[in-house]
Image (spheres, rainbow, N blue to C red):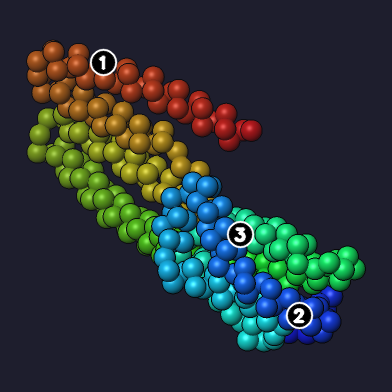
């Protein structure tokens, strides 16, 4: 933060300005209590409950009075600037909107200008003193609002750090779970391959047609598992997630069950139910697949 001679130079605040403010310090000291009371009344009229709760304390009244008298002390040094910066930090931590700081400075400025106008008869001296007061008030406003911004940036930076850490953890966890899913799909695919060979072996033990249908059903399930694995691999590589694959899994499952049910000569109601479900799933699969194809072609 720019302090000392540098910030004085930016506002053209010179030793003469300090001397002018010191010269009117006795006058302004007499009006200090009145000015702060006026300030608090004006803020009360704004009707902000949160601010009212914070200003209705004797300690804060004294702090505001000391700040007001400090404007005319003529000691705008490093300690003075540091105290102003601390004022901004405290206001920010108390949750006071910086808007009210601007309002307070404006109220004090208007009130002080009126006091100077009634206390200084020489017009040139009045204008010079008012100019000096404007400079010190602008410096105050600058430093207080700057510390507000610094405090908010520190708060936002810490929030972004937490958010970034959380997002990185979530991304790493998601990648890990995708790898686990691929491993599980590999295991299930190996299991389906085993089931297929088991059904082939059943050709020797049982009815030829029943063994062929069971083996065909296992082969269809194997095809589905391969599709699921390919979809997951594409997803890990950054490809789109195709919901049609999962509809296809359900569709193939019901087709396999229908084949087995037909071979077992179970009740027709069960077969009709499965055919109805297959018809609905087939329609849904076609619609979703059509949509996904259009999106890829765009």
Q: Residue 54, percent across and down?
A: 44, 61
Residue position marked by numbered label 2 in the rendering? 23
C-alpha gap between disc 2 and disc 1: 98 Å
The local secondary structure at tag 2 comes to helix
Task: Give the crowd class for mark 2: few <14, some 14-19, many >=20 residues within 10 Å.
Answer: some
**Residue depicted at x 78% and y 62%:** 117
C-alpha gap between disc 3 and disc 2: 24 Å
Q: Residue 212, percent across and down?
A: 22, 32
User: Is 146 rendered above or below residue 276?
Assistant: below
Q: Nearer the viewer, residue 234 or 119?
A: 119
The local secondary structure at tag 3 comes to helix
Q: Nearer the viewer, residue 213 or 176?
A: 176
Task: Give the crowd class for mark 1: few <14, some 14-19, many >=20 residues within 10 Å.
Answer: few
Specify whether 163 is left or right of 136.
Answer: left
User: Is 53 rendered above or below residue 252?
Assistant: below
Image-quadrant location for residue 11: bottom right
Task: Give the crowd class for mark 3: few <14, some 14-19, many >=20 residues within 10 Å.
Answer: some
Q: Residue 292, percent across and down?
A: 51, 32
Residue position marked by numbered label 3 in the rendering? 104
Label 1 vs 3, first from the N-terminus = 3
Label 2 vs 1, first from the N-terminus = 2
Q: Nearer the viewer, mark 3 or mark 2?
A: 2
Specify whether 123 is left or right of 244.
Answer: right
Q: Quadrant of the N terminus?
A: bottom right
**Residue depicted at x 17% and y 45%:** 198
Residue position marked by numbered label 1 in the rendering? 276
**Residue depicted at x 45% and y 38%:** 242
Q: Quadrant of the C terminus?
A: top right
Specify whether 91 is left or right of 99.
Answer: left
């Amino acid at each position: 933060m720019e302090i000392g001679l540098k910030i004085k130079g930016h506002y053209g605040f010179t030793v003469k300005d300090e001397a002018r403010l010191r010269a009117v310090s006795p006058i302004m000291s007499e009006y200090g209590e009145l000015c702060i009371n006026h300030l608090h009344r004006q803020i009360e009229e704004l009707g902000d409950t949160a601010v009212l709760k914070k200003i209705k304390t004797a300690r804060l009244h004294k702090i505001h009075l000391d700040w007001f008298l400090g404007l005319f002390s003529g000691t705008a040094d490093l300690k003075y600037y540091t105290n102003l910066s601390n004022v901004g930090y405290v206001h920010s931590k108390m949750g006071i909107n910086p808007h009210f700081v601007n309002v307070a400075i404006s109220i004090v400025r208007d009130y002080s200008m009126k006091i100077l106008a009634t206390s200084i008869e020489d017009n040139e001296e009045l204008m010079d003193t008012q100019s000096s007061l404007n400079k010190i008030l602008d410096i105050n406003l600058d430093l207080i609002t700057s510390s507000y911004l610094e405090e908010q940036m520190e708060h936002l930076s810490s929030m972004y750090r937490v958010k970034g850490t959380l997002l990185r953890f979530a991304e790493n966890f998601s990648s890990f779970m995708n790898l686990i899913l691929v491993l599980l799909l590999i295991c299930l695919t190996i299991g389906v391959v085993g089931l297929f060979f088991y059904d082939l072996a059943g050709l020797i033990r049982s009815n030829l047609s029943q063994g062929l249908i069971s083996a065909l059903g296992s082969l269809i399930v194997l095809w589905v598992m391969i599709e699921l694995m390919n979809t997951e691999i594409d997803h890990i590589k950054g490809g789109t997630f195709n919901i049609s694959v999962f509809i296809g899994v359900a569709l193939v499952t019901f087709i396999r069950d229908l084949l087995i049910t037909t071979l077992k000569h179970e009740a027709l109601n069960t077969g009709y139910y499965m055919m109805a479900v297959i018809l609905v799933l087939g329609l849904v699969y076609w619609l979703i697949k059509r949509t996904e194809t259009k999106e890829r072609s765009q």
